[in-house]
Amino acid sequence: MLTRDRPWILAVFAFAFTWHLLAVMAGGWSRTHHVRHGRDFASYHYAVEVAVSGGNPYDVGQLQAAARQDRIRNSVHPYLYAPPFLLMMSWTQAFDLPRAFHLWFWLHTGLGVLTAWGLWRWWRPWGGDLIGVCIALAFALMTAVPNNHAMGQANFAGLGLALAGLALAQGQRPAWGGVAMGAACMLKMSPALFVMWWILRREWTAVIAACATGLGLSLLALTVVAGDVQIGFFTEVLPTFGAGSYNGLRVPIGLFGNHSVPNLWDAALPHPGFGLGPAARLASQVSALALLAAVAVAFRRPVGAPDGLAAQIACVGVVILLVPVFTYEHHLVFAIPALAVSAWAAATGRLPVALTALAAASFVVLCFDLQALKRMAEADRFGLSWLGGLFRELKFGGLIGLLITTAYLGSAHDDATLADPRSRRPPLPTP
């Protein structure tokens, strides 16, 4: 329980709760309750409908036909998730699209709160009440959270299960941790990078359990998706993610609010049409491999201190955002652990002055409203065209800032140094 002699903590939690409630209602629900077309959620809804009827949910034409039959919308984005994701969303068939979309808004809001609460429960033994404050503020202030709910996305389902898996594995229950992580990977493919982090740490029980769970869920998904369709996802659909075509997704990579490394390469090496050009694709792949290798080298030394492990986990969460071709506002909820651990480290003096400033700046820009940034980028600031480009990439810069601070916290010190900054003092001379 929170200590009574620290009322400011209660005040901050009350502020965070109130702000989050207002953000969800004003920034999320007010933009959602009148919407019938389901936004991004429609892809899940119609994919389930097509799969249950014996069709191929990865066939865009079949999704479009199902959408037109509903007479609510004429088109829908391609379905991009692994087959087991349809098991989680199978409940949508009991409702029409508008009702399912609105119900998912509140279900996913609850998943978000549960994820933040679970992260605090996991990190509180080493971070105290202060880490809870940092998590609460990051969760409440990030505009990505209400945006995630309003778009009908499913990011908290994957993030919450991934963090649960990491917590269980760290709590001496690696098999159950692997089960949770395997489920997370079947909902969102990106948590697979956490499995790679386990491989780096040689946590084989968790790795094997995660792979076995993924296989088991794929077999269970045969009840709704045929085997040849599942094979087609892994052999035909999944490879398109690296090319930026995403199973025929017709969304420009350079759309404002894409915060990934491949987005920069697409701007530097443009290509007509949708997807990355050959040069940008190669540069993106090289960049991804270089980033993964750099993180692996930085974390090659074993770290046992829980705050050092938290920093490594948070850093992997940032890499998850930088590597894909598309990283939009709603995806940024994966940066919540990095925001929290960086803020905690800055507040407790575990970061040098320069990195403290970098962590603070990253926190501010990642919590800044995306539409406000867009208006600032599009405004004519005395003919300074470069200023618009700066505003456009501010959130990308914030992710790079978090990458640097979490990599420093997770790699630069041994356990004693990370736990107590005073241990950085040089030893006293001996007579």
Image (cartoon, grey):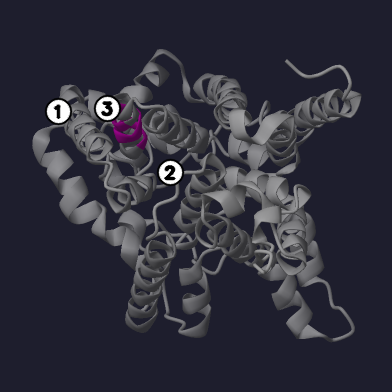
For the point 77% across and 70% down, which residue is it?
378
* Helix, strand or loop under label 2: loop
Looking at the image, can residue 333 be seen?
A: no
> Which residue is located at x 76 percent, y 70 percent?
377
Q: Nearer the viewer, residue 187 or 310?
A: 310
Locate residue 267 relative to residue 44 in the image: left or right.
Answer: right
Residue 212 picture location, percent across and down: 18, 32
Tell me which label, 3 or 1, sits earlier in the chain: 3
Mark linked to residue 100: none
Q: Main secondary structure of the magenta part?
A: helix
Mark 1–mark 2 distance (CA, rounded to whole Å): 27 Å
Query: Label 2 vs label 3: CA separation?
Result: 38 Å
Q: Please say if 315 is above or below 42.
A: below
Q: Nearer the viewer, mark 3 or mark 1?
A: 3
Residue type at mark 2: give it.
Val
Q: Amino acid at mark 1?
A: Leu
Which residue carries the number 1 mark?
Answer: 219
Q: Is residue 286 left or right of residue 207?
A: right
Instruction: Confirm whether the magenta stretch covers residue 181.
Output: yes
Height in image: 145 above or below 70? below
Q: Position of residue 117 (x, y in %)?
A: 61, 25
Q: Quadrant of the N terminus?
A: top right
Sequence-first tag of 2 and 3? 2
Tag shown at residue 175: 3
Q: Amino acid at mark 3?
A: Ala
